[in-house]
Image (tube, coloured by chain):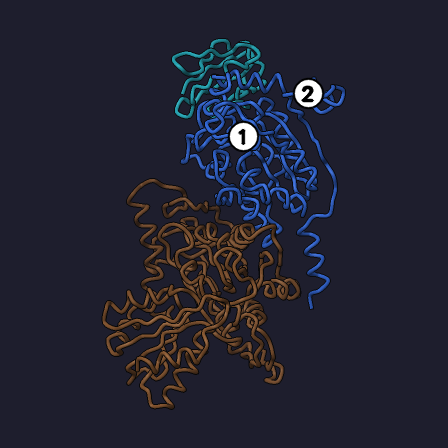
Amino acid sequence: MFDYGAYLRKDKFPLIWCSGCGDGIALKAMLRAIDRIGLSKDEIVMVSGIGCSSRLPGYVDFNTLHTTHGRAIAFATGVKMAKPELTVIVVTGDGDATAIGGNHYIHAARRNIDLTVILFNNWIYGMTGGQVSPTTPFGKRASTAPYGSTENAFNISGLAEAAGASFVARETVFRPQVLDKFIEKAIRKKGFSVVEVFTPCPTTYGRRNKMRSVIEMMNWLKDHAVPKSRAEKMDPQELEEKIITGVLVDLDLPEYTEEYQKLIDRVKS
Amino acid sequence: MTEKTAKKKRSRIVVKREWCKNCAICVEFCPKDVLVMKDGFPEVVHIENCTLCQLCELRCPDFAIEVYEDET
Amino acid sequence: MVTKEKNRIRVMTGNEACAEGALAAGCRFFAGYPITPSSEIAEILSRELPKVGGKFIQMEDEIAAMGAVIGASLAGSKSLTATSGPGFSLKQENIGYASMAEVPCVIVNVMRGGPSTGLPTLPSQSDVMQARWGTHGDHPIIALAPSSVRESFDWTVRAFNLSETYRVPVVLLLDEIVGHTSEKVVLPDTSEIQIVERQKGDPKNKDYLPYKQTESDIPPMISFGEGIRFHVTGLCHDETGFPTNDSQKIDLLLRRLNRKIERYRDQITDNQRDQLDDADVAVFAYGSTSRSARWAVRRAREEGLRVGLFRPIVLWPFPEDEVFSIAQKVHHIIVPEMNLGQMAHEVEWASRGSTDVIRINRIDGDPVRPQVILEKIKEVA
């Protein structure tokens, strides 16, 4: 049994999240990854925005920073620049990172600053009661899309890739034993890394979209996740509604804080 | 806390009822049907079938189920 | 290090002096976004900060710049951003965060005409109320209004000192005139510059509480990575930093946040008084407008009129006691400003009906001319 307790603020338990919410599964995967890398708790800063997933830092015994809606990556950029020796992990959600915080998400990727973003994608604004989000699939219902969404959904991982991220991986909480390996790689990667985690929200998404129980939602994730290697052999029609999982980007690129340090060394009198 | 031990396979499963939110993920996705839901909580009924795969623990969102490999 | 005086004689603008003041104060992080008429501050610091091992970043927007400034300050760097009206509006939510989470930082707002995009290249003083009440919630703020190039240097240093002392965001309100006017200045020798560092908590103290109700009302700070792990949030929190809905703890926090400025008002406030002792008429003016007012007051004195100048350099907290005592002695207070009476309203309130408050308002991008103030003095004296 992995000793999660060493990393938890147990006096804050039980978790705020609803029954069946997958966020806790991803949290555990993150702790296993951190443990494997052997980082000390003092050298980790965990930064979040607003939303369900952004409550995560409150439960972990690191330096934790719960910021304003959408701005976690901006705050994290300041922390990382001031102390590049710290490992800065951002915990955010689909609404937080790609709606109100979309600008920071793409620009941090473009700069390739060494942040690890764990992005919980549950297709919905859970904490505020199930409003439509940038990742709500077309036609799916939300409290502000009562007839089904008439908008197209963002491909979050694709967005990070296009913007210049060094590392992008995607997985569902149905496969936590793989998820922790991706998170480990993402943290180890020098550069901007994203792990997009598909996680069920039975309370505000499932019950509006014919998946009343978390079991149905977990089964949906199981049935719709397609590893990248397999997806490459499938045609676009077969891939409709599918989640392509795996390491999607893994590049060695110049990292922002290292480049800035080189600049300092060059101009410092 | 409820606890059951199988000497043969040396696995021990602990359910922390105070943190459990009764989602039943652990029960539903156990490959060996080791667990059932009883009174809203997971209960170990076939510890002898447990293979220590730990999927119940890995998928528990609430840190409410723990699988230990005990010394015989 | 003592610099030869000739090296300290410079011709520079207020924006340049502000950037130099920041460096002298120990600022080692700047995040900003280009906006007229403040951009020179960012440009200078992009060049100068790396020379002293500091960091500069041009963020993707004003909101991000404010967020990065808070993050860097929590990691231990003295941090600055500079902007103007519309950008100042965008920063407000995170300025509220800095108030709530007690993160020292300095925000320069080189005021231009508004509302909206308004007058990017022309001066105004219409952000004085935005500085006070721009973000939601009850919170204290310190806002400073220098009126010259030399003062831009000195008050940038002071802004950092106040920010670090009281763990608050401090707003430095330049206006386009102050920011862009070139003047000959003699900068202070580095040995003359008083620099204040934040009160640090002891990283070995395992009982450290980041938001402790201390006797001073200002809890000592520990930076991220120093060995004490704690939680920072914009939610109402208790002494540990974790969110709370306990009404007693919420009340304790919010009252302390306000009290920590209110009780040190005397140490924070600063103003200039010119010939007020025997005055029948007072002029209340701040920022670049105070320079027009000073000329008008002196000219009126030459003509034998008993008039004086009250010039607050610290606009917030507002010098209400000082204004009240002046209001009891004079029959008119003239308030010239480049807005429609934002501070005049405050002067009226502080006067409590004991004098007539006369407004001179200019909102067309032109400064309040000295002659206009002089005419008003003659009219009422």
Earlier residue among tags 1 and 2:
1
Chain identifier of the blue chain: A
Q: Amino acid at mark 1?
A: Lys
Figure check: A187 above or below C222? above
| Secondary structure found at label 1 | helix
Q: Which quadrant, please, contains the C terminus of chain C?
A: bottom left
Residue A175, how many percent across, how many down? 60, 23
Q: Amino acid at mark 2?
A: Leu
Q: Can you tell which quarter of the image residue A173 is in? A: top right
Figure check: A37 above or below A259? above
Q: Are marks 1 and 2 on the same chain?
A: yes
Q: Which quadrant, please, contains the N terminus of chain C?
A: bottom right
Q: Can you tell which quarter of the image residue C265 is in? A: bottom left
Figure check: C19 above or below A96? below
Chain identifier of the brown chain: C
- Rendered residue at 62%/55% (across/down): C58
- Front-most of residues C238 and C45: C45
- Can you identify the residue that label 2 sits on? A239
Residue A45, how many percent across, how many down? 54, 45
- Front-most of residues C219 and B48: C219
- Rendered residue at 55%/62% (across/down): C120
- Can you identify the residue that label 1 sits on? A28
**Disc 2 crowd, CA 10 A, few/some/many (<14, 14-19, 20+):** some
| Secondary structure found at label 2 | loop
- Rendered residue at 41%/43% (across/down): C242
- Front-most of residues C21 and C341: C341
